[in-house]
């Protein structure tokens, strides 16, 4: 059984995140995707401090398919350099882990 990871990304477009989530679920590369309410992001871009309203997408998937997931995310994302950050899940309910595993290719 592959280790579960959670990948996060952000975008100023809910439609972009919906497209990414739909594709990953359809292709069985994610067990579950969640899109948050608006968040405020503050960051440096092109040597200027920027601030924007964005939405966050959380993707529950397996670590062994990270590269496939990231490739699809990049191809569908509207940012030049999208945030694609994965965190290892260190503890997970066994029933949830088994369910998630059955959702992935």
Image (cartoon, rainbow, N blue to C red):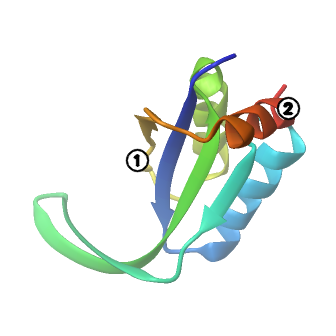
For the residues bearing labels 2 and 1, Cβ distance under 8 angstroms: no
Q: Crowding at label 1, few (<14), some or many (≥20) Cα neighbours within 10 Å?
A: few
Question: What's the mark number on residue 90?
Answer: none
List x then y, in percent, for residue 31. 75, 44
Q: Residue at x 12, y 67 (%)?
A: 48
Name the residue: 13% across, 70% down.
49
- Distance of label 2 from label 1 (alpha carbons): 31 Å
**Residue 51 position within the rendered picture, expressed as x and y whole percent measured from the top left:** 24, 78
76 vs 74: above or below:
below
Of circles 2 and 1, which is in front?
2
Q: Residue furthest right?
A: 26
- The residue sitting at the front extreme is 94
Q: Which residue is mark 2?
A: 102
Image point (56%, 61%), residue name: 57
Q: Is residue 100 above or below residue 10?
A: above
At numbered mark 2, what does the secondary structure look like: helix, strand or loop?
helix
Q: Residue at x 82, y 47 (%)?
A: 25
Horizontal side of 60 relative to 9 (left or right) equals right
Residue under circle 1?
A: 81
Q: Is residue 81 left or right of residue 33?
A: left
Task: Give the quadrant of the N terminus.
Answer: top right
Q: Residues within 10 Å of mark 2 (few under 14, many from 20)?
A: few
Label 1: which secondary element = loop
Of the pair 105 and 12, the residue shown nearer to us: 105
User: Across the whole image, how many numbered discs are drawn on residues?
Assistant: 2
> Where is the C terminus found, in terms of image quarters?
top right
- Residue 89 in picture, x, y percent from top left: 47, 36
Which numbered disc, 2 or 1, marks the residue that appears first in the sequence?
A: 1
Q: Nearer the viewer, residue 55 or 61?
A: 61
Residue 100 drawn at (x, y percent):
75, 38
């Amino acid at each position: 059984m592959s280790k579960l990871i959670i990948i996060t990304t952000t975008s100023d477009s809910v439609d972009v995140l919906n497209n990414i989530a739909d594709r990953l679920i359809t292709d069985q590369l994610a067990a579950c995707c969640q899109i948050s309410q608006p968040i405020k992001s503050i960051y440096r871009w092109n040597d200027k401090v920027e601030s924007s309203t964005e939405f966050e997408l959380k993707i529950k998937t397996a670590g062994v398919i990270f590269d496939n997931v990231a490739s699809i995310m990049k191809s569908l994302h509207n940012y030049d350099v999208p945030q694609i950050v994965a965190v290892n899940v260190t503890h997970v309910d066994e029933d949830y882990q088994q369910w998630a595993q059955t959702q992935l290719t």
